[in-house]
Image (tube, rainbow, N blue to C red):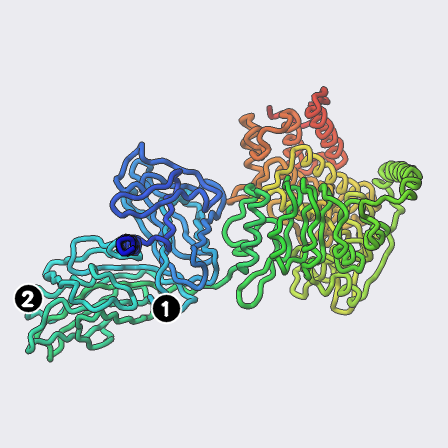
Amino acid sequence: MVLVAKNTLLRSFFCGLVLHVVTIVYAQDDQSGFISLDCGSKTNYTQEGSGIHYVSDDGFIESGVSHDLSGIISYTTRVYNSLRSFPENKRNCYTLRPQKGKNNKYLIRATFFYGESRGQPPQFDLYIGVDYWTTVYISDPTTFMAYEMIHFTSSDYINICLVNTDSGYPFITSLELRLLDNTMYKEQHSQLLIRLHRVSFGTNETIMYKDDKYDRIWDPINAEGVKRETIDTSSLKPVNEEQVPLKVISTAMTPLNSTNDELYYTWSTKTNDAYIIYIHFAEVETLKSNETREFDININDTMIQTFSPSTNITTITKQMPGVSATHELTVTRTLNSTLPPILNAVEIYSLKQLSLNQTDDQDVAAIWSTKSSYGLLKLNWQGDPCFPQPWFGLNCHYNATGVARIISLNLSSKSSTGGIAPSLASLTMIETLDLSYNNLTGNVPEFLARLDNLRILNLTGNNFTRPLPAELLAKSEKGLLLLSIEGISSEVKSSCLEGSCRNNKPKIVVILAPIIGCIVVLCIIVLIVKQLRKKALIKWDEGFTPRKQQFTYSEVLSITNNFKYEIGRGGFGRVFHGSVGAKQVAVKMLSESSSQGYKEFQAEVKLLMEIHHTNITSLVGYCNDNNHKGIIYDFMANGNLEKHLFDGCPNVLSWERRLQIGCDAAEGLAYMHYGCRPPIVHRDVKCSNILLNESFQAKLSDFGLSRAFPNEDASHVSSANVVGTIGYLDPEYHLTYRLTEKSDVYSFGVVLMELITSRRAISEGINIINWVKSAVEIGNVENIMDGRLEGCFDINTAWKVVEIAIACVSPTSIKRPTMNDVVMDLKHCLQSQKSHQSGSMSFNLESVTEPNPR
């Protein structure tokens, strides 16, 4: 028993000793607070020499192109053998999620190495979140540049963004994050500390990890005219709050001549940002009883402090006002001192105020999880969801403290599969959720009914299991939720609330089903006949006058729920979502500061009351209540055409859909020119004034600038002022002040070019008309087409549409086609594209009167 006990005790002692040794080793190499990204690398590894564990950056960013430089030039420091560049997107962001999360202090370092053989390095900006950090400028491609900051974060997510400034594609070599102790660097939490200098005096060696457990890099300075002093670190007292490494503080510089009274260190700043300096001291000699070391510390001839160092590590901190100049730190021996001054180490940081703008962490976690659940990689969701502008498909509410909440999410037609993501339950402030036209299945979760702020829920076009949650249906029936899903009517809601939507099927349903089916089929036939008659008549129906309805301002407040859901803004004012009974509407309210005034308001209301066409927005009513003026018209679920063509919209409109939109808009204009008596000129035809409903049918909108001809026989309208939008404006109208329907034809030609190219009318100073014509002159229409179509179009149809667009933007109006001609030609193109897609013979498209540029 005693022997066993001794063996057990010995074994326990040995295990404890091993554990203690392991703990010591781990403490010396604790990288638990590190994130070390080798940008562009595809593998994880441990860097020789430093022992730092680097990982690929693939899991931290979704854009960019990896480049392996090892075949060009190989460095023993492996991290410099690759980089990631960003040829696409204006802004590309890494998202770091440190283990310790928010309310902690971090050192963040971005490193850049371009390589001599790659030419002149680009220049671009670096941001942390929405706040500017620095401009990356590398004068010598063979040098390594490191930009570093210290940041106290109030979010679990840290976004480091590279922003293209049109001086070459941004790139990055490595990105590193190091957890610091919160006692270090007591700057204000709303400020960044951006490193200017960090130097260790009296050494020829760069000091970094593992000598500095926080992986700060200390540059060596061992200048002429001074000597190096080194002290045995065992005599130093414990480290101070700034955690200065012993290897840094154990060396110092002192004048070579002991009678010299002064040491100085100079540096330059190029901005007017305030800066803060940390001066680290420790005595490096064992002083005799009759020896004293004392000196005055001055910055730019301003006395900071008289100081006498000891073996305790001491840091003197001073914040100074910003000025772009050369600065000087001077330590000068006092009259009482028998020894010259010393300098051990210095850190200098510029101070940059943070905006503190960020999305609530709960919402960020929810939207990232939703993105992961649905695999939404094509949306280019990067950085903060709400700043500097909301991600595509999101709307946010911003409070006075700079924290944003997500209030709207549109994931319609994203080919998403699976069930409704549980993470959506965490979007507690969401008001509008659109999951329509995906491939979602399973049960509709009850948590949707518990989202107190949810007012609009669109689940149409999926394959959800029934019954729906009773709580959700009850909320819809009470008018607290606008619910869209197949098969929902008031009768269905009532029966579901009473529990009859379960698997039990009463016999009466079986009896009534054929009867109801017949009635439904009959109704559909009647509707189809009516619709066909309507299509035949409505285009040129002059006598139709829609119901005129005037609303009071209090009624408008009720319709819009106190203007709760803003869906757009324009020169007229803001646009809000609302409901008139079961009908969804958009309410455009005239702003007091609007450049479009009461005259334009009257013009638009009058015009919409007098005309009606399937491709012109329908007037529901208007408000003219004292100072409150607004127009209420049909809600267009897919917004305007502009947002589907530009700014990297991930949902690419097919070529057939673009042709259909062009036909719709052209028919609306043709009706205004030839179906109205007298004719009407729109005067502001552009993509933002073409709205799209839930099936992407196009309708013209915004008629505040429209003008009617004096009479049916008039050839033009004399205009005292030329109005319209630059890039779309008819040059002949601009010169002569004579407005004709051909001015709209010119603007529509520009819209056609935008539909073809997904390029703005004026982009980077280049006019789209000149750009398209130059490509056509060399017979290269493929380069004109939006590259995102990936060749999915009939080349003959494409040529024809380009020819129509070029004819429309002829400098002289007499050479432009009429809108009737344009409608006919575009319909032929649409039919030809459909035939091409189905494999049928296409129509003859060689009917243009202009010379064929092929």
* First along the sequence among labels 2 and 1: 1
Whether residue 373 is situated above or below residue 286 in the rendered picture: above
Q: Is residue 597 left or right of residue 90?
A: right
Q: For marks 2 and 1, give the one nearer the viewer.
A: 1
Q: Amino acid at mark 2?
A: Asn
Q: Which residue is mark 1?
A: 187
The N terminus - image quarter: bottom left
Residue at image coords 62%, 29%: 792
Q: Quadrant of residue 791?
A: top right
Is residue 743 visible to us here?
no
> Between residues 153 and 85, which one lies in front from this camera angle?
153
Q: Nearer the viewer, residue 64 or 596?
A: 64
Q: Check disc 2 and report the residue beneath it.
A: 257
Is residue 298 shown left or right of residue 118?
left
User: What quarter of the picture does the C terminus occupy?
Assistant: top right
Query: What mark, if any, has residue 450 been given in the picture?
Result: none
Q: Name the residue nearer the viewer: 592 or 219.
A: 219
Pointer 1 local density, CA inside 10 Å: few below 14, some 14–19, many at least 20: some
Q: Residue 210: where, in percent of width, then height?
A: 26, 53
Q: Mark 1: which amino acid?
A: Glu
Residue 763 in the image, given as x and y percentages of width and height: 54, 44
Question: Residue farthest to the front?
Answer: 1
For residue 666, which quarter of the picture? top right
* Badge 1 element: loop
